[in-house]
Amino acid sequence: MTSPDRNRPNPPASIVFRPARPTDGAALWQLVRATGTLEANSAYAYVLLATDFADTCLVAERGGALVGAVIGYHPPREPDTAFVWQVGVRPDCQGQGLGLRLLRHWQALPAQAGRRWVTATVAEDNAASQALFRRFAHALGAGCQVHPHFPAELFPAGHAAEPLYRIGPIPHAALVPG
């Protein structure tokens, strides 16, 4: 498609990052299922997350459609920590740096103010997420330590262990999206 002057192509629609809304629940569920790699929870769970945890969940839209999301919360026993539960990017948008952009915008949400640590569990067989969290730590200028957390025995048969990735402390200057 070209612009009216026919000399310049139209740029692709820009991506808008915003906190989740209750009306995003069904779309979050569909996005997670579409990734083909994330464990999908019930549609109800995503409606609940987009309602009760909206301040700590971020969506990315392009042309009015969800293309990515970060679902997270604040662990009750760790007031200076934000936990990433799921990061999802629509397959046709993968490989373009959107996962890292999502995390940077998520970490800069007002609800994340004062959080000096970001944690996530990542399955031992999920190389893409492991690399994403290491890139995120590097982009923040923060350390990334990996510790045992959820052993495989806690899950149904066939589920890999999920070590804890602990990123931080996050320098104050890194608390804005880059």
Image: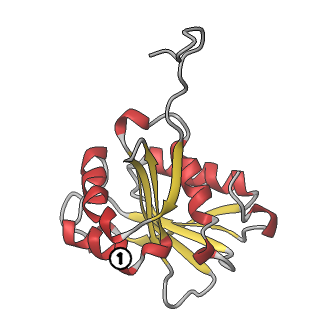
In the rendered image of this protein, does residue 144 appear above or below residue 35? below
User: Helix, strand or loop at disc 1?
Assistant: helix
Task: Please identify the quadrant where the N terminus is shown.
Answer: top left
Q: How is the image coloured?
A: secondary structure
* Residue kind at label 1, given as amino acid type: Thr
> Within 10 Å of the Cα at label 1, are there few (<14), some (14-19), or many (20+) other Cα atoms?
some
In which quarter of the view is residue 151 placed? bottom left
- Viewer-proximal residue among 6 and 142: 6
- Viewer-proximal residue among 117 and 156: 117
In percent of the image, x 61 and y 65: which residue is there? 107
Residue 29: percent from the left, percent from the top?
26, 59
Quickly name the residue at label 1: 51
In which quarter of the view is residue 173 placed? bottom right
In percent of the image, x 21 and y 57: which residue is there? 158
- Viewer-proximal residue among 155 and 92: 92
Across the whole image, how many numbered discs are drawn on residues? 1
Specify whether 2 is left or right of 139: left
Residue 66 seen by the camera: yes
In this view, which residue lies farthest toward the front? 4
In percent of the image, x 70 and y 62: which residue is there? 143
In this view, which residue lies farthest toward the bottom? 77
In which quarter of the view is residue 117 placed? bottom right
Residue 168: percent from the left, percent from the top?
69, 68
Residue 54: percent from the left, percent from the top?
43, 73
In this view, which residue lies farthest toward the top? 7
Residue 36 seen by the camera: no
In the rendered image of this protein, does residue 31 appear above or below residue 118? above
- Viewer-proximal residue among 75 and 89: 89
Residue 116: percent from the left, percent from the top?
69, 75
In the rendered image of this protein, does residue 47 appear above or below residue 70? below
In percent of the image, x 25 and y 69: which residue is there? 155
